[in-house]
Amino acid sequence: MSKSSKIQSTMILTYKEGVDVNGKDIIKNARFAKVKVTALDDDVLAVGAALGKIMEYPVINVVRADNSVIVSE
């Protein structure tokens, strides 16, 4: 049997920076490390949405990336 524990969380905002010469969307990511692993998803989304309001470009997604350590019991 194994058990996992979150050790790190990162919030990633995906945003559209514009379009290239061929008319294709230019998509970028902004990473915010050191999100508390105990933070609720709703809270991370709320922070991402608030940051999106002050960013120069429109936010497409708010992503939470968690890293965990897995150990056997």
Image (tube, rainbow, N blue to C red):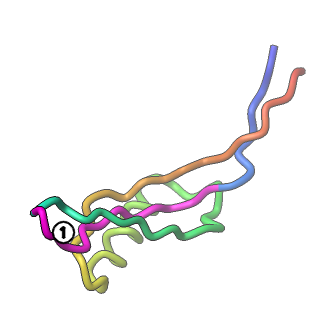
Q: Magenta part of the protein: which range?
A: 9-22
Q: Is residue 23 left or right of residue 72?
A: left
In percent of width and height, residue 63 lies at 42, 54
Against 21, residue 51 (above or below) is below
| Number of residues whose C-alpha sits closer than 10 Å to that of mark 1, classed few (under 14), some (14–19) or many (20 or more) | few
Quadrant that contains the N terminus: top right
The amino acid pointed to by label 1 is Asp
- Judged from this view, the residue extending furthest toward the left is 23
Most foreground residue, 69 or 21: 21
Q: Is residue 71 left or right of residue 29?
A: right
User: Is residue 5 one of those drawn in magenta?
Assistant: no
Against 60, residue 30 (above or below) is below
At 46% from the left and 61% from the top, the residue drawn is: 12
- Give the image quarter of residue 24: bottom left
Most foreground residue, 55 or 21: 21
In percent of width and height, residue 33 lies at 61, 67
In percent of width and height, residue 38 lies at 63, 55
Magenta stretch, main secondary structure class? strand
Quadrant that contains the C terminus: top right
Against 44, residue 67 (above or below) is above
**Secondary structure category for the residue under label 1:** loop
Residue carrying label 1: 20
Q: Is residue 21 left or right of residue 53?
A: left
Against 48, residue 67 (above or below) is above
